[in-house]
Amino acid sequence: MPVTRTRGPVHYPCSDGKPMAETPEHLEAMIYLIAALQAYFAHREDVYVAGNQFMYWIEGNPTQRVAPDVYVVFGVPKTPPRPTWKVWEEGKAPDVIFELTSRSTAGEDLDRKYRLYQRLGVKEYIMIDVTREYLIEPVILHRLVGREYQQVPNERPNDREWWVTSEQLGLRVMVRAEDTGYLVRLWDPVQQTFLPSIREATEELLQMYEQLEQVRQREAEARRQAIELRRRAEEEARRAEEEARRAQEEARRAEEEARRAQEEARRAEEEARRAEEEARKRAELEARLRELEEELRRLKGDGKSANP
């Protein structure tokens, strides 16, 4: 009799066990792009940024998969994090995909992924050759026009830089040749600045913490000085109050001394007046006494004349 096989759930692997990136340059660029884009779109709940994950586009066929290095999707919830990207579950493919290409992945990046992303409707496909192994220009942007990709020309402000503008991201992608290799950065035309790397953001944060600590120390010193100045001002006010009290006491004492001096002067004047009165009376008595003595002598003289 026939045997009916029950088909179990399809398993979609999250990893193939291969290294995250081919070289340190690829790894650094991948980490930078993911972290910078996540930070740039942190305020939006409808933007999902991830990378180095499998993307599946045919339900039930886990063999059909690719692993974009970096991708951005608009119009989907930011959370929860997805271990893989399943187009049929999310309802769409990513809007922007970055591939950090190399000579070993050139065939897939230029052929299979190019045709796949074009068919899935990925609006911008950006290839960056961080070691410039085979691309004539280290950054190439393909923009979907209708159903086909068109390459967007690069801008060359100098012989060491290549710039291309992503309409979907609202950012400009720059690759600059430096002595240590190629530097990948995203430019914000609104803020007129590059999106910082994790290291740069950390250094900036540490500088801000240092500046904040310096401000706190200055504020603490300012408070200490203010407290000291207040203490000195209170001490000076207390001393001034004490001096004023002493001055008032001295003034009161001087006023008392002046009153006493006036009283003494009045008494002296009174004593002088009394002494003058006494002198006048004495002079009158002495004059009267002299008159009486004179009268007595005259009387005595008259008595002798009457008795010879």
Image (spheres, rainbow, N blue to C red):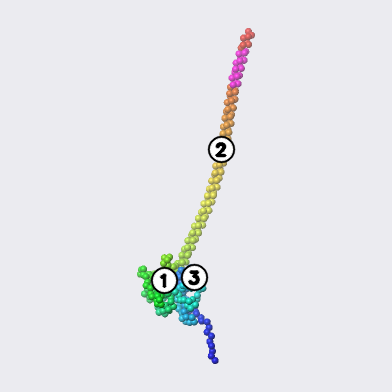
Which of the two labelled residues, at mark 3 and mark 2, occupies the earlier sequence position? 3
Mark 3: amino acid? Glu
Estimate the spatial distance between the alpha carbons at disc 3 and disc 2, rounded to whole Å.
86 Å
Q: Main secondary structure of the magenta part?
A: helix
Q: Is residue 173 visible?
A: no
Residue at the spot of label 3 = 45
Q: Position of residue 142 (x, y in %)?
A: 40, 75
Residue at the spot of label 2 = 255
Report crowding for label 2: few under 14, some 14 to 19, many 20 or more residues within 10 A (C-alpha).
Answer: few
Q: Residue at x 49, y 61 (%)?
A: 212
Report whether 265 appears left or right of 156. right
Which of the two labelled residues, at mark 1 and mark 2, occupies the earlier sequence position? 1
Q: Secondary structure at mark 1?
A: loop
Report crowding for label 3: few under 14, some 14 to 19, many 20 or more residues within 10 A (C-alpha).
Answer: few
Estimate the spatial distance between the alpha carbons at disc 1 and disc 2, rounded to whole Å.
93 Å
On-image quarter of the N terminus: bottom right
Mark 2: amino acid? Glu
Residue at the spot of label 1 = 167
